[in-house]
Image (spheres, rainbow, N blue to C red):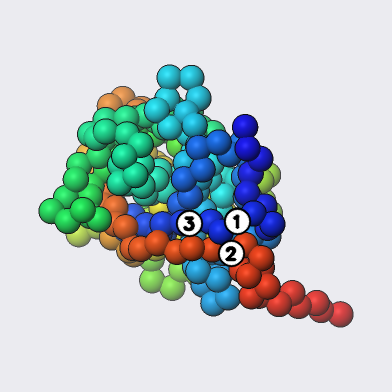
Amino acid sequence: MMTPPTTESPLLRFTKHHGAGNDFLVLVEPDSNGPLPVALVRALCDRQFGVGADGVMQIVDGAGDADLGMILQNADGREAEMSGNGIRCLAQVAVLSALVMPPFFTVATAAGIRTIEYIEGDHIYVAEASVDLGAAVLGPDQPQKFPDRKVRTVDTGNPHVVMFGPDLDGVDVVDIGGKLQSVYDGGINVEFITRGDEPDTLVLRVYERGVGETQACGTGSAAAAAAARSWGLVGDHVTVHNPGGTLHVSFDGDQARLRGPVHRVGSVVIDPAAVLAAARPVTTTR
């Protein structure tokens, strides 16, 4: 087995994809056995000093019966268990690289093996994909001072805290989301939701651990739908309006499935040493 790419490695070729504005750089590295260096991921994901992305993913050999494997690192370089949008982006790379045959295939993640359904669109670089997220595990409903506000944790393969309110006007997503990272061991994804204009719809904003506020979150949309469903706000088929686009969540019992668009943006060839040389200067405070 090869070791993971390092800053002394040859050029690395990534493709960039997004699902509802949640964007990822994806590397096909079948023989890799570990994540990329943290400093390199941070430099790559920086939107001013690097390429820009919410995270970096590697396609690796599948484990057990899975067709593929996945390594996911958030923009801060730390590994994450799962991304509903990211795995759909990875699926598009796998199909376009002829590593799998659509529509159905499986991906081994740190949260378990996930089944993908990939539907090709009218353009080769546009598709729709869905992924089973497994059980949405609800934490206790946390009592609130005001009856029109609700909070509970949800695990959809990674941790979330869902906060429902009458509207999202004036919500400081970055401040509240950032502060909650120190409250939960290892950090947590924070979803702020309210009802949409139509039945079974939600409007969502999200703070993702290791990234910050993002345009969309797939597992977060499923967590939001699961929490809202537990509160009697929505049914088994939920439309979730993220800032970057609309995602759809369906339930069979406690089993959640996420569906949404995926787009290939382009490709980029990276010299790791050059990326690190161009990285954001480290500032110190006294």
Specify the amino acid type for callout 3. Arg
Q: Is residue 13 visible?
A: yes
Distance (Cα) linking label 1 and label 3: 10 Å
Disc 1 vs disc 3: which is toward the camera? Answer: 1
Distance, label 2 to label 1, CA atoms, is 7 Å
**What is the secondary structure assignment of the residue under circle 3?**
strand
Circle 2 Cα neighbour tier, 10 Å, few/some/many (<14 / 14–19 / ≥20): some
Q: From this viewpoint, which residue is outermost toward the front?
A: 10
Vertical comparison of 213 with 185: above or below: below
Residue pictured at 16% horizontal, 50% vertical: 121
Q: Quadrant of residue 249?
A: top left
Q: Amino acid at mark 2?
A: Asp
Residue 108 circle label: none
Name the residue beneath numbered marker 1: 10
Q: What residue is shown with label 3?
A: 13
Please tell me which residue lies in front, 2 or 163.
Answer: 2
Residue found at x 26% / y 33% = 101
